[in-house]
Amino acid sequence: MTGRCRQSFHKMKKVLKEAFLSSWVKYSGSASLLVFALMAANLCFSQSSRHPMVLTDFTMPDSVCAGQAVTIQNNSQTASSYYWSFCTADAGGIPSGQAVINTFLNYSQPAFAALVRDNGIIYSFITNAGTKTLIRNNHGTNLLAPVVASDDLGNLGGLTMNEAGIQVLNDNGHWYGFIANEGVIIRLDFRASLQNTPTVISFSGISDTIARFNGLIIVKDKGKWVGFSTNLIGNSLHRFFWGDSLKNPPGGTILGNIGRLNAPYQCTLIKQDSNWFMLVCNSGDSSISRLSFGTSLVNIPTGENLGKLGILAQNRGIAVLRDCEAFNGLIANNASGSNPLIRMNFLGGISGTITGQQLGNIGSLNQPGAFSDFLRIGDTIYTLLTNSAGTSVSVLYFPSCTNASIPSSILRDPPPVTWSTPGTYNVRLVTNEGLADQESVCKPIRVITPLTLNIGNDTTVCAGNDLILGLKAPPVMDHFSFLWNTGDTTFYIHARKPGAYWMRVTNKMGCQTSDTIQVSQLPPVTGTTDTLLCYGQTYFAGGAWQTQAGIYYDTIQTIKGCDSVHISNLSYKPEIKVNIGRDTVLCPGESVTLHANVTGGTFQWQDGSTDSVFTATGPGIYWLHVVKNKCLVGDTLRIGDCPARIWIPSAFTPNGDGLNDELRGKGISIGKFHMEVYSRSGQRLFVSDDIEKGWNGTTNGQLCPADVYSYIVTYETTDTGESRKVSGTFTLVR
């Protein structure tokens, strides 16, 4: 019995019981129940035959290997048409995007958007806050192409710069649009086509005293139209009721601040199982509020504030799509310089933990405002996102994939399908598309990486030894079976003979792979090496590094595990002694000749010269390479800078002839300098801090007599930074 039959039967049974209790029926209760049950069943089955129910369902494996053909069984009944899509858009991925610029009309602070399709034509409606108008765009059949036509529908009898949320809905073939504007709801009646010029009615008196309606969402729950709007400045939520038709004037209820609303902007409704939830963007404190209505939108919701998700910044727009039993959501950050597009990840569904993930700037976003509803066109999912700081609207879309062997089918029983690339794909079946009883079901299939197997490269083993072939450990996943050409069914075997071995692995989906290895045998090896080495060269033999001539024996195990004996006969050439001298220093004007002290051979100094001698004229590192008897030897020495020195003359003649007229210090590598001159009696006659400034033999303008004087000099060296002091005497000659 179908579900509709069960309902009819139980309804008739309830009527029968009421009649029996009120004495309407004179027959026995059991007989009456039976008669009415048969009547109900007959009525049900006759109605079922006239109006058959469509049950849309199919079965397929949960997982499959890449490249493996999958046969899908269609369990649907009595459908007039079927549309299969095997690689639909994945709303859980990263969307693509582009800016849509209206070449007919200028956007000016676009606030909210609606995206719908009427008779195959895609329409978008944009509330243009900058000009206080509503724009209608005709996109033809391609939302990514330039706009086909655009109409400025005008002010519509009272739109202000605070015009905000917009919803465009079809109610039994009749199109209505609703705009949240200040504290009123404006209804647009397009009648049977969105191309018509709408008639306008404004509904007021359904808001707070202080109200600025912003986000707007309208859905049908249990056959009744219910809507909600956020109050941006009142931090409250409003609910509207239209009853069973959107042509009715809406009634309003103020629900107040639920979930710590703070300048609430866009809101969205989501149904999980039989429970309704609402998510609201709070642009005031960059947070998200979650409201729970239970099983009916008529209920008073409970609320909680989920915080900033770690990355929200004046978030305004929010949109959630349930696709193939998975929830996928996007948030728009409006703050300038922030990461504008955020993806919501739902752990445990809408009622579970919600985290945020930054997606960056997709579609040339410029302080984005609000999302339109999602719209599926073919196998691609679209949404619009307004740019409140720009003159464009961005379209974000999740394109269909191209990894299925066939993209779609209209057959009742589709041909086998394969997927070339690992991943999770959505398979969707739509029955009676475009009719009143259209149904759709979507199921995911996980395509796993093709099986790979590598039991090793061709190899060689020692005679008498065996080799373990196969997997090092059993697979982590169960339901694998193994087969060897030896008949073994384990995940490894012992290969004791030379030859070819192959292994085949099969998983629970029936995917198979195999690999072959060639095994050869290697006999023991004995070898001898005669080696002549240069003096001092080391050689590993006899289990150690050797420097002496002799015969050495090694037992070596090869990488295949075979033992081999190796004999090394070592001999050495005569020693070559090279000595170019000891480390030294050179002062300016000095030089030193370096000698190789080797007869025969070839020479190379550090500068590339090839003589046996080399003259060094300054500090540096000097080396010599000598090649003799095919052996290379060398030596190195370091010549340093001349140590710091200072000289004070033992006499000077200040007679004005231009020669030796001043007592001056001379030095090498001298930094700071200080000199004092004293008379024989200890009187200080002269002071200088400049090595270039000397004493001319006078004091206080008077000539000093010829005599013996003394000096004290302190200085610092520039090469080592040392402080030194010298003193002595000199003779003033006149």
Image: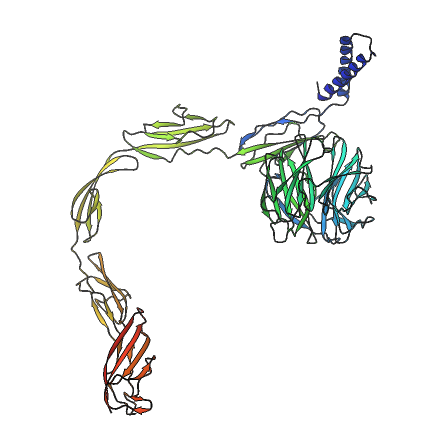
Instruction: Determine the image quadrant of residue 194.
Output: top right
Q: Residue 48, position in %: x, y? A: 75, 20
> Could you say which is closer to the camera, residue 728 or residue 451?
728
- Residue drawn at x 78%, y 45% is 209
Please tell me which residue lies in front, 432 or 37.
Answer: 37
The answer to whether 173 appears left or right of 86 in the picture is right
| Quadrant of residue 647 within the rendered picture | bottom left
Residue found at x 15% / y 55%: 574
Instruction: Classify 294 as above or below 667.
Output: above
- Where does residue 284 sit, x and y in percent of width and height? 66, 48
Quadrant position of the N terminus in the picture: top right
- Decide if residue 371 is in sight here: no
Q: Is residue 468 left or right of residue 158?
A: left
How many marks do you count on the picture? 0
Q: How is the image coloured?
A: rainbow
Residue at the limit of the structure toward the top, as seen here: 28
Viewer can see residue 497: yes
Image vertical order of residue 702 relative to residue 347, above or below:
below
* Quadrant containing the C terminus in the rendered view: bottom left
**In-front residue for pair 205/598:** 205
Left or right: residue 10 versus residue 503 is: right
Residue 456 place in picture, x, y as percent: 38, 35
